[in-house]
Amino acid sequence: MSSDKTPVAPAANFIRNIVERDLEQGTYASRRWNGTPGDASHQAAGEPDPAKIRTRFPPEPNGYLHIGHAKSICLNFGLARDYGGVCHMRFDDTNPEKEEQEYVDSIKETIKWLGFGWDAFDQSHLYFASNYFDFMYRAAEALINNGHAYVDQQSAEDMRLNRGTLTEPGKDSPWRNRPAAESLQLFREMRDGKHADGSMVLRAKIDMASPNINLRDPAIYRIKRAHHHNTGDKWCIYPMYTFAHPLEDALEQITHSICTLEFEDQRPFYDWVLERLAEAGLLANPLPKQYEFSRLNLTYVVLSKRKLIELVENKHVDGWDDPRLPTLAGARRRGYTPEGFRLFADRIGVSKSDSWIEYTILEDCMRETLNESAERRIAVLDPIKLVISNYPENQEEDCFAPNHPLHPELGKRVVPLSRELWIEREDFMETPVKGYFRLFPENMVRLRYGYVVKCTGFDKDADGSVSTVYCEYLPDTKSGTPGADSVKVKGNIHWVSVNHAHAAEIRLYDRLFKEAHPGTGDRNYLDDINPDSVQIITAQLEPALKDAQPEERFQFERHGYFIVDKKDSQAGAPVFNRTVTLRDHWHK
Ligand code: ATP
Ligand code: MG
């Protein structure tokens, strides 16, 4: 059953307001698109852009996506979907050495899993920033020729000293006013491998006294002899990220370039670069605009790449797709749903204020989507035996359990009943506490979808724990028969027949951290790891679960939502991961 629960119109937010204003005012109506990214003359030869807006999701392929990225993905792809646009899938692979195909593949797969894609207007919009190196180089030469960039030969140390501070202006480099022709020649020599790594850089010529340090002649190209996965050894100079990023946006005709708040101070440089290149005729107007929103911070979770790497490498978790990790690969294995992530993104919205989002909000989104979509099954997680003394040995009968209470059209399945059943250890108490309505001596409960039974006794192991409970059933009280209501009981417990059940491994996952803000104050986040974040048990399952397929999701009645692990399950022997309990047990 598929259920797409993402509301058609998510709540308004400041970015949606900007997009709507731009559409109303026709800010981008004059843009043209020539089928591929390109400079001003390339786009000018194209048709009016069929996409009303263009956004992009631009990960560096140097790690796995996490729940924070899901916010950005839902935002960028969601805007494109809702406003007749397209969101470009762009790998920001301008930094040599770091990227790997494994990450490219995993990122693409994860975005599709979240329910998004980059095919629109009869073409695919999958781009690699490294394909723009030629243009970036050309743009740098144009800046030099127009007096907007120079080659600086100061040592890295001097450059740092001369940058100034928040309260003091910087000092001009002695090379700042060298003739453009000299910078051009040196820049070409940098490109041709005539100078050592780090011996000189190309810098934008803006203002060493600017109150915004990012405008104090930022470096835009550096020498680095490094092999690039796409361009090989063609280049020994590479653009800096802050120079490359606006160019990538402009070549792709992006309208709204949305990033996280730490780039706010870079926005003036973003605009400066694009304006200079538009003046030079290299980039098409109207230019992209950058907007910033606050990144996701989730309680009980760490999202920093460095920490995630540490958790994996030091084996605090079992690989990048460990179901306890906040990676999307982990969340998927845990059983979190794409619908749940989209609902979560809409529910938390976007803003410019940094805040922590409660983890329960994410869990509730998963519960809501799973409640709707997951079929119900029965599993006894901590089994003890229940013997129905007055039920004939060798007899069995069918009981009928609905697959989904909200969807009667999904029908019922057979759950066989016999003399010996597995029930939950916690559904029996020798001496009941106040308010306990389940099994205890002389009390009656309903075996869900079966009969009312009355507890007649119990046995204990040598260690004093209850091993078997005895009861007698009331033959006229079977669920679904006219006599079902003749005896009123307060308790209703689930069970599986011992002869029909099959045992399966179940991993009961819980939060990876026991503190809401891991590692804050003077604590190390590693000390905040929850020692009980997973418990592996053998449970007794109803027969219908034996053939559950990888990634099938179920609600185990009274317990929570579970998914068949896609890695460790075998045909006929599924292993289950607990996605989330039915109710939050962290905030009692
Ligand atoms: P790095 O530290 O390597 O830059 P990153 O987390 O920024 O890592 P990117 O691959 O650069 O990873 O991220 C791709 C996009 O995801 C960026 O546009 C970034 O703003 C966004 N993003 C990353 N983390 C979050 C977060 N916690 N909340 C919202 N958006 C995020
Ligand atoms: Mg980044």
Image (spheres, rainbow, N blue to C red):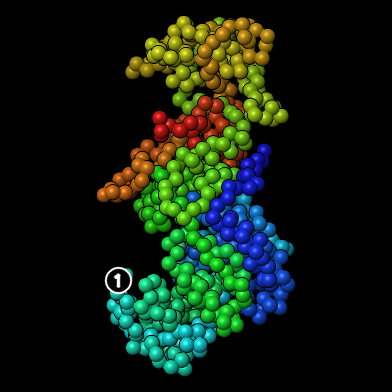
* x 45%, y 64%: residue: 264
Q: In the image, is 19 to the left or to the right of 442?
A: right
Q: Which part of the image, by quadrant, shows the N terminus?
A: top right
Asked if 424 appears above or below 529 in the picture, the reply is above
Tell whether circle 1 marks a residue whose Cβ is less than 8 angstroms from ligand 1: no
The percent coordinates of residue 71 (x first, y second) are 52, 52
* x 63%, y 47%: residue: 9
Asked if 160 appears above or below 374 in the picture, the reply is below
The percent coordinates of residue 450 (x first, y second) are 60, 15
Q: Quadrant of residue 25?
A: bottom right
Mark 1 element type: loop
Q: In the image, is 231 to the left or to the right of 410?
A: left
Q: Nearer the viewer, residue 142 or 22?
A: 22
Asked if 336 appears above or below 392 in the picture, the reply is below
Q: Going by the picture, which residue comes out furthest to the left?
A: 522
- Can residue 223 be seen here? no
The percent coordinates of residue 167 (x first, y second) are 30, 71
Q: Nearer the viewer, residue 371 or 575?
A: 371
Q: Nearer the viewer, residue 446 or 41?
A: 41
Q: Going by the picture, which residue comes out furthest to the front?
A: 25
The percent coordinates of residue 102 (x first, y second) are 52, 60
- Can residue 456 be seen here? yes
**How many badges with numbers are in the image?**
1
Q: Which part of the image, by quadrant, shows the C terminus?
A: top left
Q: In the image, is 397 to the left or to the right of 513?
A: right
* x 45%, y 78%: residue: 220
Name the residue type under label 1: Thr
Within 10 Å of the Cα at label 1, are there few (<14), some (14-19), or many (20+) other Cα atoms?
few
* x 36%, y 78%: residue: 209
The residue to which callout 1 is attached is 167
